[in-house]
Image (tube, grey):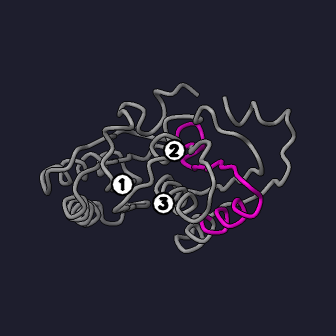
Amino acid sequence: MEYNNRVGDQTPTDEYEASIGLIECSSIATGILVADAVLKQSPVEMLWARAISPGNWLNLFTGDVEEVREALDKGVMVGGEDIVDDLFIANLHPQVPEAIRGPRKGVEFDAVGVIEFRHVASTIVAADAAVKTAAVDLVEIRLGMHLGGKGFVVLTGPTADVEDAVAAAAAVGQDRKTLVRDVVISRATEELIPFLSS
């Protein structure tokens, strides 16, 4: 997949504020209406507003905590029944935007965890929870495009830490009813690693 198809690719990682909000709509028209409402509600910066698979619309925005919270509340109200998923993270872990942009370079592989979700927002919330729970490195967060709207997280670290991180991420998906599957590979074969890191 070309990086320009990735959520957030147009925004350098140093331009992400700590607080982010995301609203995914099943209707493109409603998604555009929501984007307008979000921007009118608060002085947030829109990082991403575009169509994603399978014909949904995604709005990703950043700013001060209260501004993002107010914008999110307004967007969810305007989107109504067309809202597929949403997120609010007050203090985003810095590995998250890096992993969204593509496989992170220089990551040393140990045990590998993979967590798969039905929606983009849940994927980001779960990735943030995983990396805040245990001493793991996010390898990649793949979102929406060419995945039928799904998302998945690949992470690595010592086996016990990967197990804890995967459990935390899976719990997010279970709470949001978006978890598809989670796996831990304690000793990934060397032949697999290039497919996870390039």
Q: Is residue 130 left or right of residue 9?
A: right
**What span is in magenta?**
142-169
Q: Is residue 176 inside the magenta stretch? A: no
Q: Residue at x 84, y 45 (%)?
A: 188
Q: Quadrant of the N terminus?
A: top right
Location of residue 22 by image quarter:
bottom left
Tell me residue 81's x, y (percent): 35, 66
Inspect the image, locate mark 3, and give the three-letter code of the amino acid beneath it.
Val
Which of the marked residues, 3 or 1, is nearer the chain's N terminus?
1
Q: Residue beneath label 1, please?
A: 22
In this view, the residue farthest toward the bottom is 175
| Secondary element at tag 1 | strand
Q: Residue beneath label 3, please?
A: 125
Inspect the image, locate mark 2, and give the three-letter code of the amino acid beneath it.
Pro
Question: For mark 3, does the 10 Å Cα neighbourhood hold few (<14), some (14 to 19), or many (20 or more) residues?
Answer: some
**Circle nearer the viewer, 1 or 2:** 1
Tell me residue 54's x, y (percent): 51, 44
Q: Is residue 112 left or right of residue 61?
A: right
Question: For mark 1, does the 10 Å Cα neighbourhood hold few (<14), some (14 to 19), or many (20 or more) residues?
Answer: many
Which of the marked residues, 1 or 2, is nearer the chain's N terminus?
1
Q: Residue at x 73, y 42 (%)?
A: 109
Assess whether mark 3 and mark 2 are in contact (beta carbons under 8 angstroms): no
Inspect the image, locate mark 1, and give the three-letter code of the amino acid beneath it.
Leu
| Secondary element at tag 2 | loop
| Secondary element at tag 3 | helix
Q: Residue at x 37, y 30 (%)?
A: 10
Which of the marked residues, 2 or 3, is nearer the chain's N terminus?
2
Q: Residue beneath label 2, please?
A: 54
Tell me residue 43's x, y (percent): 14, 51
Query: Of residues 1 and 159, which is closer to you in this image?
Result: 159
